Amino acid sequence: MNSELAIITGGGTGIGQAITYNLVEKGYHVLITGRREQPLKDTANKNPEKITWVSADVSKEEGREKIVAAIPESTQLKYLVHNAGIITPLSAIKNLKLDEFRKIQAINVEGPLFLTQALIPKFNGGRILHISSGAAHHAYHSWGCYCITKAALYMLYLCCNSELQEYGILTGSVRPGIVDTDMQTVLRDDKNSFPNQDHFKQMKDDNQLVTVDECATFICQFLTATTDAQFAQKEVDIRD
């Protein structure tokens, strides 16, 4: 394995898978993580020499420990992409259940926070990238858990940038737009309809969704080819 490594959480499907393939084309070795083994295996099988995988739940301490243990001692971590995240179950605030909120928070916020913490010793310089959302900055009816946790992830990006630069680690954040992924399928089909559900259905019908390849190309360019100032100074939006 190359002495430098990229880690992609949620790397078995969607945006994470597309980022993985893009980085491999650029010559990087990539370790992908996720909760389901089969998508990870399928993704890695495309280029097993450069893609390794570990089935791990980033929201749990033992899952994060598995990820750290999967990195060979001689390997330096170049990139960490916090891509794993969930949006469901959708719920209006008045109906929100505590266990539902805690599940989403554990994946969307606690996972990136404590995985970053665990991996700091593996970096020698390098970059961390958060996959953000417009929902971090705007409230959407019935998306309370997602909006709140993505807003927290945005603040985590700011805090990491404030604290980790002393270790030579830069943190960036990117809003990928509305991407044609399984998450969008879930939103369109969710039986607990929400006020703007028809808008997402119409975007799919009108072919207005960003493709995963377009998204990954933008993200990887931002991750690997920007200056330090461009990467860390502000969250970027693919639509800009």
Image (cartoon, rainbow, N blue to C red):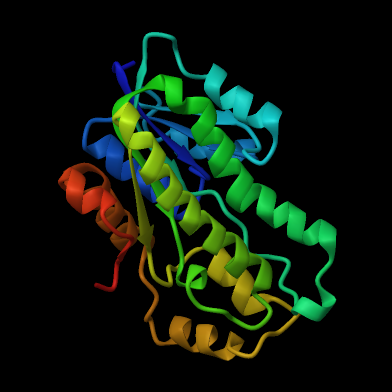
Q: Against 147, is 219 above or below?
A: above
Instruction: Specify the quadrant of the image occupied by residue 78.
Output: top left
Q: Is residue 41 visible?
A: no
Instruction: Specify the quadrant of the image occupied by residue 40.
Output: top right
Provide residue 109's location: percent of width, then percent of height.
Answer: 59, 50
Provide residue 28's location: percent of width, then percent of height.
Answer: 28, 30
Which residue appears at 80% of the width and 71% of the height? 96
Question: On the rendered image, what quadrant is the N terminus found in?
Answer: top left
Q: Against 77, is 179 above or below?
A: below
Which residue appears at 32% of the width and 36% of the height? 165
Residue reaching furthest top?
74
Q: Nearer the viewer, residue 150 or 194?
A: 150
Which residue appears at 79% of the width and 60% of the height? 100
Left or right of 155 on screen, residue 86: right
Question: On the rendered image, what quadrant is the C terminus found in?
Answer: bottom left
Which residue appears at 60% of the width and 38% of the height? 38
Left or right of 10 on screen, residue 126: left
